Image (cartoon, grey):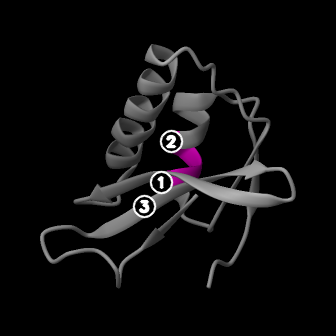
Amino acid sequence: MDGNFALAPRLFTQLYVIRVPLASSYVTCVYALMSGKTQADYDSFLTAVVNECRRLGYSPDPTVVVTDFETAVIRAVSDVIGRHVQHQGCFFI
């Protein structure tokens, strides 16, 4: 999971993406234009993603999530997806 500030249109703060493993690569499966980067913003975003997955018949339950070292994202993952999720920090370029 990662946000990009340079690619976001002016009305938004960032373009946020979720990538998942597929075979020997990773595929971007969620794109979100976000207007903020608070924990509440990430909570709402992740809740919407989880709800849509469930509506489509999927049960998102990752064991590891890789993000940058943004505290708001780390806490939102724990609150929305679960405390069992292991966080791996990464410096995205």
Name which residue type carries label 1: Ala
Q: Which residue is mark 2?
A: 76
Q: Quadrant of residue 55?
A: top left
Expressed as whole percent of the image width and height from the top left, the position of residue 7 reads 34, 80
Point 84% across, 51% down: residue? 23
Name which residue type carries label 2: Ala
Q: Which residue is mark 1?
A: 72
Expressed as whole percent of the image width and height from the top left, the position of residue 92 reads 64, 78
Report, in whole angstroms, how far the alpha carbon at label 1 lies from the one at label 3: 14 Å
Report, in whole angstroms, how far the alpha carbon at label 2 lies from the one at label 3: 14 Å
**In this view, 36 is above or below 39:** below
Q: Is residue 33 magenta?
A: no
Q: Nearer the viewer, mark 2 or mark 3?
A: 3
**In this view, 11 is above or below 53:** below
Could you tell me which secondary element the residue under label 3 belongs to? strand
- For the residue pair 53 and 71, the one nearer the viewer reads as 53
Could you tell me which secondary element the residue under label 2 belongs to? helix
**In this view, 84 is above or below 12:** above
Q: Residues within 10 Å of mark 1 (few under 14, many from 20)?
A: some
Q: Which mark is residue 16?
A: 3
Report, in whole angstroms, how far the alpha carbon at label 1 lies from the one at label 2: 6 Å
The magenta stretch spans which residues? 72-76
Point 62% across, 67% down: residue? 69
Asked if marks 1 and 3 touch (Cβ < 8 Å), the reply is no
Q: Residue furthest right?
A: 24
Point 35% across, 54% down: residue? 32
